[in-house]
C-alpha cells in the first residue's frame, strides 16, 4: 500500500534539528504519525516557515517509499496525460487540449489520478495507457502516456473497452436539488426524471444506485463519490441548454415521448373521456377543448390549451439536431 502523506502548509526556519523520529530530505521534514505527541507536532508546525514543510506520515507508511526506511523522500514519478473533447472543461487552463506532465508518488489508481486532476470518473468512457485500453483500477506507472476520452454515446467504440456498462436502453435520471427546471423539461419530453428539492446528496446516490438512474448535476464533487457509476456533469447553467446537453450527450431524441408524463410529479399521463373530468374543468377548458389526459400520480388534468403551444415550441427546439439550430 502506498504511503499516505499529510502535507502541512506551515514551514520551519532552516537548520533546526528536529526530534529523532523526524527525518529531513531537502526542504521536507518527515514525522511518523504516532511518533510524536499532538502537542509536539503542533509546536513543530508553529516553528516551521517557508520553504520548509512538515510532512506527517500516517500509520500505514511502512512501505518501500517511506522516507523513514532510509533518508530519501518518496520518489516522485511523472506520467504524460492528455484529455479529449469536453473533458478539457474540467481541467485548469494550462492543461487543456495538450499533453502535460502529471507528478505522483506511489502507485495511484488511474481513477484517483484523473479525479485528482478534477475530472469526475463518470464523465470518462475510455482510458488508453501507452495505446492500450485500461480499467479504472489500473495503477499508474512512471513514464505512462495516458489518453482520456469522454463518453461516446454516438460513436462506435466497441473495439475499445468501455469503463461503464453500455448505455441503458431507456435512460432514467435523477436531478440534483438545483435542477428543478431541467427536471420539468425532461419530463415534458417523456423522460423518467426524479427531482425533489429536499434530497440530500446521499439520498440522490442511494436512489440512483437502487434504480439505475443517471445523476444530473453541475456539482462534479457529487459524481466523484465511488458509489456513483452513471452521472453527467452539466456545463450549461440555464435549463434549456442543459436539457439540450443531456439529449445530445445520451442521444435521447429518438426516445422522446413528449406530453406523455406529468411535469409536476413525473407519473405517466392517461387519456380520459371529457365526460369523466368535466366537473373538474375550468369553464373555458370545458368549452374549447375535447381531448384530456390525467396524471396517474397526482391526478392533474392536462389539455392542449395555449400553454400547450408554448410547450410544444420548447419540445421542437429541444429535439432539433445541433446542425439544424
Ligand atoms: Zn402528476
Image: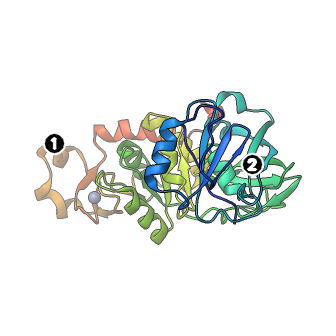
Label 2 Cα crowd, 10 Å radius (few <14 / some 14-19 / many 20+): some
**Residue 118 quadrant:** top right
Q: Is residue 138 above or below residue 147?
A: below
Say what secondary structure mark 2 lies in. Answer: loop
Residue at left 27%, top 63%? 272
Say what secondary structure mark 1 lies in. Answer: helix
Judge from the rendering whether residue 311 lies leftward or rightward of residue 60; answer left or right. left
Which x, y percent locates residue 274? 22, 59
Ligand 1 quadrant in view: bottom left
**Sequence-earlier tag: 2 or 1:** 2
Disc number placed over residue 73 in the picture, else none: 2
Which x, y percent locates residue 137? 71, 64
Mark 2 C-beta to ligand 1 under 8 Å: no
- Residue farthest bottom in this picture: 210
Q: Quadrant of the C terminus?
A: top right
Viewer-nearest residue: 292 or 98? 98
Judge from the rendering whether residue 223 lies leftward or rightward of residue 1; answer left or right. left
Viewer-nearest residue: 63 or 48? 48
Which x, y percent locates residue 52? 63, 35
Residue at left 54%, top 37%? 9
The total of numbered circles placed on residues is: 2
Which x, y percent locates residue 190? 44, 55
Q: Is residue 218 visible?
A: no
Q: Is residue 32 visible?
A: yes
Viewer-nearest residue: 318 or 286? 318
Circle nearer the viewer, 2 or 1: 2
Amino acid at each position: 500500500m502506498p504511503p499516505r502523506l499529510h502535507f502541512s502548509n506551515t514551514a520551519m526556519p532552516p537548520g533546526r534539528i528536529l526530534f529523532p523520529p523526524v527525518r529531513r530530505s531537502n526542504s521536507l521534514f518527515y514525522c511518523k504519525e504516532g511518533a510524536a505527541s499532538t502537542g509536539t507536532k503542533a509546536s513543530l508546525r508553529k516553528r516551521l516557515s517557508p520553504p520548509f514543510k512538515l510532512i506527517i506520515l500516517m500509520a500505514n507508511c511502512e512501505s518501500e517509499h517511506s522516507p523513514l526506511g532510509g533518508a530519501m523522500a518518496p520518489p516522485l514519478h511523472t506520467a504524460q496525460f492528455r484529455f479529449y473533447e469536453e473533458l478539457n472543461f474540467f481541467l485548469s487552463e494550462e492543461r487543456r487540449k495538450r499533453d502535460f506532465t502529471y507528478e505522483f508518488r506511489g502507485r495511484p489508481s488511474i481513477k484517483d489520478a484523473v479525479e485528482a486532476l478534477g475530472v469526475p470518473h463518470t464523465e470518462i468512457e475510455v482510458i488508453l495507457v501507452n495505446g492500450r485500453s485500461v480499467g479504472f483500477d489500473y495503477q499508474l506507472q512512471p513514464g505512462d502516456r495516458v489518453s482520456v476520452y469522454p463518453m461516446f454515446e454516438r460513436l462506435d467504440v466497441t473495439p475499445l473497452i468501455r469503463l461503464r456498462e453500455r448505455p441503458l436502453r431507456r435512460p432514467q435520471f435523477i436531478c440534483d436539488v438545483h435542477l428543478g427546471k431541467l427536471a420539468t423539461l425532461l419530463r415534458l419530453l417523456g423522460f423518467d426524471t426524479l427531482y425533489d428539492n429536499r434530497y440530500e446528496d446521499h439520498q440522490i446516490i442511494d436512489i440512483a444506485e437502487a434504480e439505475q438512474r443517471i445523476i444530473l448535476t453541475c456539482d462534479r464533487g457529487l459524481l466523484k463519490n465511488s458509489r456513483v457509476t452513471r452521472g453527467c456533469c452539466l456545463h450549461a447553467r440555464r435549463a434549456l441548454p442543459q436539457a439540450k446537453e443531456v439529449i445530445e450527450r445520451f442521444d435521447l431524441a429518438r426516445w422522446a415521448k413528449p406530453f406523455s408524463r406529468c411535469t409536476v410529479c413525473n407519473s405517466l399521463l392517461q387519456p380520459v373521456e371529457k365526460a369523466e373530468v368535466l366537473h373538474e374543468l375550468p369553464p373555458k377548458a370545458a368549452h374549447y377543448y375535447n381531448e384530456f389526459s390525467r396524471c396517474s400520480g397526482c391526478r392533474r388534468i392536462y389539455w392542449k390549451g395555449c400553454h400547450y403551444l408554448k410547450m410544444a415550441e420548447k419540445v421542437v427546439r429541444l429535439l432539433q439536431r445541433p446542425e439544424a439550430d
